[in-house]
Amino acid sequence: MNDRSLKSDLLRLGILTGLCLLIGVHLIRGTVLIAVDGVFYIGQAQQVAQDVAGVARRYPAGYPFIVWAAHEAVARLSGHDSTMLWIYSAQGVTLLCRVLALIPLYFLGKLLVGAAKSFWALLVLIVLPYPARYGSDVLREWPYLLFLSLGFWLLYWGLRRRQWWVLGVVGLAAGLGYLIRPECAQLVLYGLLGLSCVSFRGRIRSLAPWGAGLLLVAGFLLPIAPYVGATGEVTPHQLRPSTFNAPPVISAIGAWAASDDPLEFEVREGELLELPIRADDPAGDPLTISLAGVPVGSRPVYEFRLPATEDRVWTTSETEKSMLLATYARQVCEYARIVCYAYVQSDARPGLLLVRRWWSPVQGRHIYLESEAQIKAVLQASPEASWVSDNVAFYVFGPDSHPPDAVPVYRRGSLEKGCSWTVGDRTPRAEDGQQRTAPSPGSQDESRAGAIVWYVDRAGDPPAGAAIEGRVLRWRPRPGQKGDYQLNLIVSDGEVQCCQLVRVRVIAAPEPRTEDSAVPRFPSSVLRSPSGDLRLQHAGLEKLPGAVHQISAGIMEDLMIVFFVPWLLGLYCRLRYQAERTERVLTVGVLIVSSALMLGRHVGLGTGEDRRYSLGLIALTSFYIPVGVEILAQWLNRARAWQRPPWMPSGLAGSPWFYLLMTAGVVVCLPKLLTPLRGDKAGYRAAAEWLGQNTRAEDVLAVPDIRIGFYAQRRGLLYGQQPDSRRADYVVRIAEEEGDPPPESWRREYSVVVDRRSKKILVIYRTAQPKP
């Protein structure tokens, strides 16, 4: 490379990087909201310092680590920390990766199509709106593309110059990029493909290419081996089975929001009680709704299983149940079932017995004890177990005072080997006709078939006539059914259940009958059944033609359509008539592998944002856009010759038409390019600011978009169609012109238009009275 060529390259790179920085900074300054994925990446980055191995086990840690490092550097310089500092640090380091990626892309294009066309190709790539936005957002596309383009350039350069040692650096780039996105492993495939192409041409008669292949693989494994050793994970995260299953959500029963306490209604004999059920599953799994009759005042006891120790955790707390499901993977703490029904208040029924739950971190087990004497005996018998009280678990019936329909609970085993509890189906008798009583923990009697320690209730049939029809609870009590009833509405996704207790008081019909509908114990409102099925359904496997159509549409959107035809034309003509063998093989490999990865994502994982997934393909083949534009310019020049002005460069065929076409394409991109990032979500940001100023730090928000809670710096519970108002202090809803009315117990606090062009509004509701 001579001095003139070097100066020319530096000048072109200076123009490209300067323009890229200006556009990137403009987009960062005008960002209304970062991407939804950006909230996840920042959350992972915030956990890097405490548990980098845990972050890596859940997700590739490369991009979160880059974001964390950028934040640490900026925080040390600024001397303070905030959510916005995390956002700007992440956007800034992503933009830096985009600028750096232009360098290997430029030299790759120079090798393929020449310096002039490489410059124009990257100029187009810089002004394309969607690639530019990804470079100023909190997304891993450009950091991943930095390593992909670096590796691809070095691969092509090494193959052309027969510099086999470069293949080791290519493998290293592939391994480092893999830690950001596993798709970067495609560089290894391109390397092996290129080496095969060179080896089978007949000119290379040594073993050097095959040694270069080993060097390529070794370079790839160099950063991957420590990662796999630290995390124990080899399979890419996209192919791993889900470790968490969010439970279904019951939002409202009738006109009232779901509650941890029973919802109470009144109905007269002979009249219809009709309660629509609003329910949703965050993962979109199909739901089933069942109805059980349970004793008044009882609560479901949820059972979790700890596979490592075969321990069982029983709880009546909806809050603890949600915490266990959200905190622990299924392999650590697996939801099992509703095991029985117990009570949370001592005066709910006569003769109730207090049961306390204890936990031993040493043994990794729980134990349930129902008397002070047992607790004292346990603590004295095994002080090394370090038992810690989990406070009151629930109230049950003692062995000597239980209803006839109660079922026994057996305790088996001993403290030395561990205890287990089993709910039976009937009340067994000893040989003398007396019920068996519970021996003290650790005694020899307890190692037998099992001892009855307490009695609990099991679910029964609902009262005659009560049933679930569609998503509506309907019951017309018959004469003689006067009294108090408690029903448990159970919504299940096939694995996890969500419950809502409903207490119904049936009163005698008046004479003469003057009412014609059910009367809630609270102020009534018009009950309207939800229209249609509220379940979020997975689309299932996409058919290949539909997937191809969506991927093609994503590529066209990336290229703003105006550059799509030149891109296709340049690819065809260059590969058909001008490209040498290595370029042809590697470019076709990029087209095939990138398309296969996008199709595989559609078929195996469902649809995604194809504009983002096609960015690697666009970047590595953008050099064929000016080739196609040049061909179009030649055609136009033949039809209508246009004399080149003296000041216009003459390095490209059909120069006047070429520059006119390129200028027209850039002008088409400018309006969308200069639009603020997600300006159509301005209402989300306004709602977040209101919540940040008018709520307490400990308040929980149920939000349709996780970014609202993130910008408000409050804990957000994301929901699909129905919010979990039991866990939230505030609910943010996107209100349509027509929609289900909010539950009457919610209080409207604030509303804002989503954006000027939309008729939708965001409404913030208070779901509970302020806590003292």
Image (cartoon, helix red, strand yellow):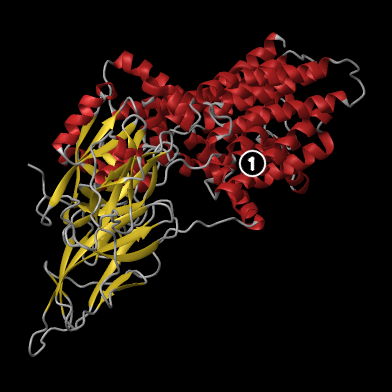
* The quarter of the displayed image where residue 464 is located: bottom left
Residue 170 point in image, percent of width and height: 67, 20
Q: Secondary structure at mark 1?
A: helix
Left or right of 136? Residue 654 is right
Identify whether 757 is placed above or below 212.
below
In the picture provided, is 697 more to the left or to the right than 171? left
In the rendering, at what x and y percent does residue 273 appear? 22, 75
Q: Say if residue 205 shows up in the picture.
A: yes
In this view, the residue in front, 180 or 146, is 180
Please identify the quadrant where the N terminus is shown: top right
* Residue nearest the observer in this picture, 485 or 225: 485
Count of marks overlaid on the render: 1
Quick check: can you spot residue 646?
A: no
Tell me: residue 313, above or below residue 261.
above
The residue sitting at the bottom extreme is 512
Disc 1 packing (10 Å; few <14; some 14–19; many ≥20):
some
Which residue in the structure is indicated by mark 1? 597
Q: Nearer the viewer, residue 485 or 49?
A: 485
769 lies above or below 532: above
Amino acid type of disc 1? Leu
Residue extending furthest toward the front: 432
Which image quadrant: the C terminus?
top left
- Which image quadrant for residue 543? bottom right
Which residue is located at x 54 percent, y 22 percent?
Answer: 227
Left or right, 717 with respect to 563, comes to: left
Q: Position of residue 623 (x, y in %)?
A: 68, 33
Q: Quadrant of residue 478?
A: bottom left
Judging depth in this view, the residue of 403 and 680 nearest the camera is: 403
Q: Position of residue 126 (x, y in %)?
A: 54, 33
